[in-house]
Image (spheres, rainbow, N blue to C red):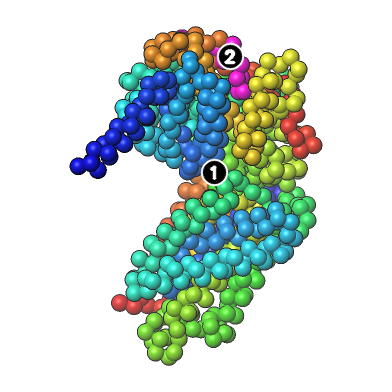
C-alpha cells in the first residue's frame, strides 16, 4: 500500500517537476510585460533538440547543453527584436497573439531543420533508478527538481536584489513611469525575453532524458506549464513550482487511484476550483487591477 | 505584323512539339494524396518518397503497357477535408486512372465516398478495418488492420500459455482502436484482459499506470497499444520499475527508431511487425525475402534514410496497381478493378496479397511476423 502510494507520489513529482520548470519560463516575460509568451514551449524544444544534434556532432554533453542554451538565448533576443518590438504600441492581447505566431514559426523551422523524429538524450548522471521504500525514482527527476529550485532562488534574488530585476518589475507595473525614471523599456523587454528563452532551454534540456524530445514537444508541455503557472499565480516563481507539482501529483494520483481516463479531467477540475476561489492563483500578487 | 506572325509560328511549333510526343505514348496517370507534412508526416513522407522513386524506376524500365506512368500527387497535411478536396481534384481535373492514398484512416475515409461514386480503383495505405469492411467495390488497402495485429499478439501469448493480460493503451486514434480490437478478440484466444489502462499521447510518465497493472492479481503479461513517444516512455518506465512480466508492444512502434529511443529497456519486448525490419533473418526460401531486401536496399540508397514499414505500404500499393493494369491490358477502370480483385499470391513487402470479392485487404494474420528485441536488435521469432 505504502509502496504503491510512494510510487504514485514519485511519478507525480517527476511529472510535476517538469511542469514546474516549464512554468518558471512564463514568469519572466509575464513579469516584464504581462504578456503570456506562448513561444515558451518552443524554447524548451530548441534547448532539447539543439543539444541532441550538437551531441551527435561529437561535442561533449556539458558543452552541447551550454551551446544549445546560448542559441535559445539568441533566438529569444531575435524574437523580441523582430516580432515584439515592432509592435510596441500594441496591447497585450496582440502581443500574445504574436507569440503564438512565433511559436508556430519556430516549430515549422525546427521541423525543417531537425525532421519529425523523436530523439533521446542521455541522463545527466547515473541511469540507475533510486529505490526508496519499495518505490523507484529517476535520478533525472532529482536533477529537474534541483534545477527548478535553483531557478526559483535565482529569480527571487534577481527580482528583489538586482537593478535589472527591479527595472523589469517597474516596467510591468507602470511603463510610462518606468520610462520617466530612465528605464529603457525595449531593452528591459529584450533582456526578459532572452532570460525566458534561456530558462526554457534549460528546462528543455533537463526534461529531455525523461520525456524525449521532438519538434512539437513544446505544444503540450507549454500548455501544461502555463496551466501550472496559472494555478500558482502568474509571475510568482514559488507559485510556478507549487502549481507544477500540484498538477503533476494530482494527475498521477488520479491515474493511480481512480482511473487513467479521468487523469486530465481531474487536473482541469483542480484548476477551475483554484481559479474560482483564488482568481489570482495560489501565490499571485494581491495588487488591485489598474482600470 | 511580322512580329505577330513569327510569334504565332513559335507558339504553333511549341504546342505541336509538346503535343506530338504526348500523343505517341499517353501516360497512365496515377493519382496520389498522402500526408507528406503535418502530424502524420512520418507515414506520408516515406510513402511519397517510395511512390516517386518507383514511378521513376518503372518508367526507366519502359513503363506499363508501353506507356509511361505519370504520378500526380498532393499533400493533404493529415487533414481529412483537404484529402477530400484533393481526391476530388484527382478525379475531376486530373482525370487519373488509379488512385493511391490516404496515409491515415481519417483522410482515406473522407475520400472514399467520392471515389466510390467516380468508380476509380483505389488503394489506401491506412490501417483501420472500416476501410475494407464492409467491402466497397472500388476500395482496397495494403496494410494489415489493427485487429490482425491484436490477433497476432494474442496468438503468440496463447502459445506461451499466457491467459491473463494487463492492457495499456494511448488515448489517440491508434491506441484506442487497438484497445477496442484487443478487447473484442481476446476471448477467441482464451485470454482475459484483467487490467485496462490508458495514457494521453503526450504524457511524460506512465509509472502510475504500470504500477497498477503490476499490482493487479494474477496478471501474466503486459500489452501496450500505442504510437509515438508513449510506448518508448512506457518501455523505459517498465524497466525503471524493474518489471519482469512478458512485455508486448504493437506494430505501431515497429521501427529501428524505437530501439534507439528505448535503449536497453526494450530488451525482451515482442511485437508483430513487417518482415522489412528483419530482412536478413528471413529464411532463404521465404518468398518475401528478395522483395523485402530489394526494396530496403533501393530505398535506403536513394533517400539516405532508413526504410519504414509505411513506405512498404506504398510500394505494395503501387506494385498492385501496376500488376492490375498489366493484367487488365487497359486502363479502363472497371477492367482494372476486376483485375485487382483477381490478384492472388502477389508477393509484396508487407505480405502476400490474395484479394477476393469478399476481401479487399488480402493479407493473412501470419503476414505479421513476431519479433523480439535481443541485444538491441530485432530478432525474428515466428
**Quadrant in the picture for residue B192:** top right
Q: Residue at x 50, y 28 (%)?
A: B126
Q: Residue at x 63, y 39 (%)?
A: B305
Percent across and percent down for residue B5 are 24, 38
Are labels 1 and 2 on one chain?
A: yes
Q: Identify the magenta region.
A: B345-358
The label shown at residue B238 is none
Q: Residue at x 38, y 62 (%)?
A: A97
In the picture of the structure, the residue carrying the numbered disc 1 is: B201
Determine contact: label 1, label 2, CB under 8 Å.
no
Q: Residue at x 56, y 46 (%)?
A: A116
Percent across and percent down for residue B24 are 41, 20
In the picture of the structure, the residue carrying the numbered disc 2 is: B346
Q: Nearer the viewer, residue B226 or A195?
A: A195
Q: Nearer the viewer, residue A225 or B292?
A: B292
Labels 1 and 2: the sequence-earlier one: 1
Percent across and percent down for residue B75 are 44, 38
Q: Is residue A121 visible?
A: yes
Q: Chain of mark 1?
A: B
Q: Label 1: few (<14), some or many (≥20) within 10 Å?
A: some
Measured in 3D between alpha carbons, the distance from the residue under mark 1 to the one under mark 2, in whole angstroms, is: 36 Å
Q: Quadrant of the C terminus of chain A?
A: bottom left
Classify A98 as above or below B158: below
Amino acid at each position: 500500500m505504502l509502496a504503491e502510494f510512494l510510487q504514485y507520489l514519485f511519478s507525480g513529482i517527476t511529472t510535476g517537476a517538469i511542469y514546474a520548470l516549464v512554468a518558471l519560463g512564463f514568469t519572466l516575460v509575464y513579469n516584464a510585460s504581462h504578456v503570456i509568451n506562448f513561444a515558451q514551449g518552443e524554447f524548451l524544444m530548441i534547448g532539447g533538440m539543439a543539444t541532441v544534434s550538437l551531441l551527435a556532432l561529437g561535442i561533449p554533453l556539458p558543452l552541447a547543453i551550454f551551446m544549445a542554451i546560448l542559441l535559445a538565448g539568441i533566438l529569444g533576443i531575435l524574437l523580441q527584436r523582430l516580432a515584439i518590438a515592432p509592435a510596441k504600441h500594441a496591447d497585450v492581447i496582440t502581443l500574445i497573439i504574436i507569440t503564438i505566431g512565433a511559436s508556430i514559426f519556430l516549430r515549422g523551422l525546427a521541423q525543417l531543420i531537425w525532421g519529425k523524429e523523436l530523439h533521446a538524450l542521455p541522463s545527466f548522471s547515473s541511469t540507475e533508478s533510486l529505490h526508496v521504500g519499495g518505490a523507484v525514482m529517476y535520478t533525472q527527476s532529482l536533477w529537474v527538481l534541483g534545477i527548478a529550485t535553483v531557478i526559483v532562488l535565482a529569480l527571487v534574488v534577481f527580482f528583489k536584489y538586482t537593478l535589472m530585476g527591479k527595472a523589469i518589475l517597474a516596467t510591468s507595473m507602470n511603463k510610462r513611469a518606468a520610462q520617466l525614471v530612465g528605464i529603457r523599456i525595449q531593452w528591459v523587454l529584450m533582456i526578459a525575453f532572452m532570460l525566458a528563452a534561456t530558462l526554457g532551454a534549460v528546462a528543455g534540456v533537463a526534461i529531455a532524458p525523461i520525456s524525449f524530445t521532438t519538434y512539437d514537444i513544446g505544444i503540450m508541455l507549454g500548455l501544461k506549464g502555463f496551466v501550472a503557472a496559472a494555478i500558482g499565480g502568474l509571475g510568482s516563481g514559488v507559485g510556478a513550482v507549487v502549481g507544477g507539482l500540484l498538477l503533476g501529483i494530482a494527475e498521477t494520483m488520479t491515474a493511480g487511484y481512480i482511473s487513467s481516463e479521468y487523469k486530465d479531467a481531474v487536473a482541469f477540475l483542480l484548476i477551475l476550483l483554484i481559479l474560482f476561489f483564488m482568481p489570482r492563483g495560489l501565490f499571485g500578487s494581491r495588487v488591485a487591477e489598474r482600470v | 505584323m511580322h512580329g505577330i506572325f513569327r510569334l504565332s509560328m513559335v507558339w504553333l511549333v511549341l504546342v505541336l512539339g509538346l503535343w506530338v510526343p504526348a500523343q505517341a505514348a499517353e501516360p497512365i496517370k496515377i493519382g496520389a494524396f498522402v500526408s507528406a507534412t503535418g502530424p502524420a508526416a512520418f507515414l506520408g513522407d516515406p510513402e511519397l518518397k517510395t511512390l516517386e522513386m518507383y514511378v521513376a524506376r518503372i518508367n526507366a524500365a519502359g513503363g506499363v503497357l508501353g506507356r509511361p506512368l505519370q504520378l500526380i500527387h498532393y499533400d493533404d497535411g493529415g487533414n481529412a477535408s483537404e484529402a477530400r478536396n484533393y481526391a476530388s481534384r484527382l478525379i475531376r481535373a486530373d482525370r487519373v486512372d488509379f488512385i493511391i492514398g490516404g496515409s491515415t484512416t481519417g483522410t482515406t475515409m473522407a475520400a472514399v465516398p467520392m471515389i466510390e461514386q467516380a468508380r476509380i480503383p483505389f488503394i489506401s495505405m491506412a490501417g483501420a478495418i472500416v476501410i475494407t469492411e464492409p467491402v466497397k467495390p472500388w476500395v482496397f488497402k495494403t496494410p494489415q488492420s489493427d485487429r490482425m495485429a491484436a490477433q497476432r499478439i494474442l496468438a503468440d501469448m496463447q502459445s506461451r500459455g499466457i491467459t491473463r493480460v494487463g492492457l495499456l493503451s494511448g488515448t489517440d486514434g491508434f491506441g484506442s482502436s487497438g484497445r477496442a480490437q484487443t478487447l473484442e478478440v481476446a476471448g477467441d484466444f482464451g485470454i482475459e484482459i484483467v487490467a485496462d489502462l490508458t495514457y494521453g499521447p503526450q504524457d511524460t510518465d506512465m509509472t502510475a499506470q504500470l504500477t497498477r497493472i503490476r499490482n493487479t492479481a494474477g496478471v501474466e503479461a503486459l500489452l501496450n497499444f500505442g504510437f509515438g513517444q508513449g510506448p518508448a516512455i512506457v518501455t523505459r518506465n517498465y524497466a525503471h520499475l524493474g518489471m519482469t512480466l512478458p512485455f508486448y508492444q504493437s506494430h505501431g512502434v515497429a521501427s529501428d527508431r524505437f530501439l534507439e529511443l528505448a535503449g536497453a529497456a526494450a530488451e525482451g519486448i515482442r511485437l508483430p511487425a513487417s518482415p522489412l525490419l528483419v530482412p536478413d533473418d528471413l529464411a532463404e526460401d521465404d518468398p518475401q525475402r528478395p522483395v523485402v531486401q530489394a526494396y530496403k536496399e533501393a530505398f535506403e540508397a536513394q533517400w539516405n534514410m532508413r526504410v519504414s514499414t509505411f513506405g512498404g505500404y506504398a510500394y505494395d500499393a503501387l506494385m498492385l496497381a501496376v500488376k492490375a493494369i498489366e493484367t487488365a491490358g487497359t486502363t479502363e477502370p472497371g477492367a482494372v478493378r476486376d483485375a485487382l480483385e483477381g490478384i492472388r499470391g502477389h508477393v509484396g513487402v508487407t505480405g502476400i496479397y490474395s484479394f477476393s470479392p469478399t476481401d479487399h485487404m488480402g493479407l493473412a494474420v501470419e503476414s505479421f511476423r513476431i519479433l523480439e528485441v535481443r541485444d538491441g536488435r530485432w530478432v525474428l521469432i515466428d
